Amino acid sequence: MAINRIAAAYVYTLDAAEPIRNGFVEYDDADGTVIRTGRCEDTSAEEVLDCAVVPGFVNTHCHVELSHLHGKFRKGTGMAGFIDQINALRDWAGKEVKQELVRKWMDKMWADGVSAMADISNDDSSFGIKKNHPMYTRTFLEVFGSEPEMCEGVMADVAELKKTADASGIDAAPTPHSCYTMSPQLLSASSAAGLESGFLSYHSQESQEEEDLLMTGTGAMYENRKRSGMSTPPVTGESSLKYFLGRLAAAKTPPYDENILLVHNVCLSQGDIDAATQVMKNVYWAVCPLSNIFIHDALPPIDLMRANKLAITVGTDSLSSNDDLDMVKELYCLHSNFPDVPMAEMLEWACLNGARFLAKDDVLGSLAPGKRPGIVLVRNIGKDGFVTGESYSERLI
């Protein structure tokens, strides 16, 4: 075994609440297995890099197959306007172009230090690349369909797509998209299929437009659906998350031990948290701050989420609603808007909690001895080890 050692101003092992100042990581040069970490005894005897060392990131929400939409969307349109752009532009590229860009952006994420990803797919264009890529990916085969009569056909189609994914050798299973793109029947059927895999990823409470649609049958998203001749979900007078919990109960009797990821959570309330945590025993809450700002200049209630000790994770979303797939930029956005959150806590969201959601925390997520999380350098850090607007990350191993 060839043991290498790197020393840095800050080492975030994530096994402790605080970073190790002037710390080191020793690791197996062959596969990156962490051997040990600690504080340098004599900083004059070795080079201590002016940077932070962190575990590999886990991007818990991405749509990498939409990378061909980079730079093509207007910002600030709200969800209804964003949906119009998706419908108009998502099919402009052929499969070869899409695959070239999937490979390019997965390679970039890997080089930037992303070790694993929870990715949304609607077709098979990314499957072969994922199979042969060093980054681990769990793929969620996203289901849409607003008309009740579509349910049987859509579920048959996603079952075929899962067979293709299985043949490609990747971890994949169906998952529902969101309340506003699905009939009640399809929302329940796809949730049931996803729960069978032990994992579910669901776009939840991304915008006030979504809440207005469910609570009062009004707003821009409601008008968008009706204008397009599409059915809308029933008006319940309750939040969209509580509606989802009802459709989930129609699929399987609670409580749920499966790993469930609720993505976005911009309109999350205390009542929603109470309702979800009562029945979801392993629920994770993904935040995608730059995407939320891109679409409608809003952010999730981080203070409320922290007060409830929720298992927060971090995602980039897609290049249709983001200028990059950069986890450090997501962390800087969070730090800029919520400066009281310790850096170590944000890194727990971006690394360890994501690994826990993917059930890969035995290998990924922290710089604990025996793990192979990837070792990442964060350059241009600021005071007390926080990311700055100039920070960037690079993979060491």
Image: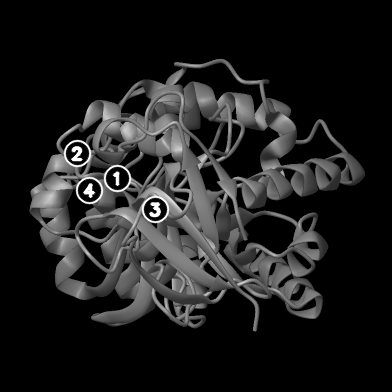
Could you give the CA–CA distance between mark 1 and mark 3, rounded to whole angstroms?
A: 16 Å
Identify the residue at image location x=41%, y=29%.
221
Question: What numbered label is drawn on residue 350?
Answer: 3
Could you give the CA–CA distance between mark 2 and mark 4, rounded to whole angstroms?
A: 23 Å
> Which of the two discs, 1 and 3, sits closer to the camera?
3
- Left or right for 75, reference 259: right
Q: Earlier in the sequence, mark 3 or mark 2?
A: 2
Name the kind of residue labelled 3 in the image. Answer: Ala
- Left or right for 93, reference 312: right
- In contact (CB < 8 Å): disc 3 and disc 4: no
Classed neighbour count for the residue bearing mark 4: other residues with Cα under 10 Å, few (<14), some (14–19), many (≥20): some
Name the kind of residue labelled 2 in the image. Answer: Pro
- In contact (CB < 8 Å): disc 1 and disc 3: no
- In contact (CB < 8 Å): disc 3 and disc 2: no
Name the kind of residue labelled 4 in the image. Answer: Thr
Residue 294: x %, y % from top left: 46, 23
Residue linked to disc 2: 301
- In contact (CB < 8 Å): disc 1 and disc 2: yes
Q: Secondary structure at mark 2?
A: loop
Q: Secondary structure at mark 4?
A: loop
Residue 2: x %, y % from top left: 65, 77
Q: Earlier in the sequence, mark 2 or mark 4?
A: 4
Residue linked to disc 1: 265
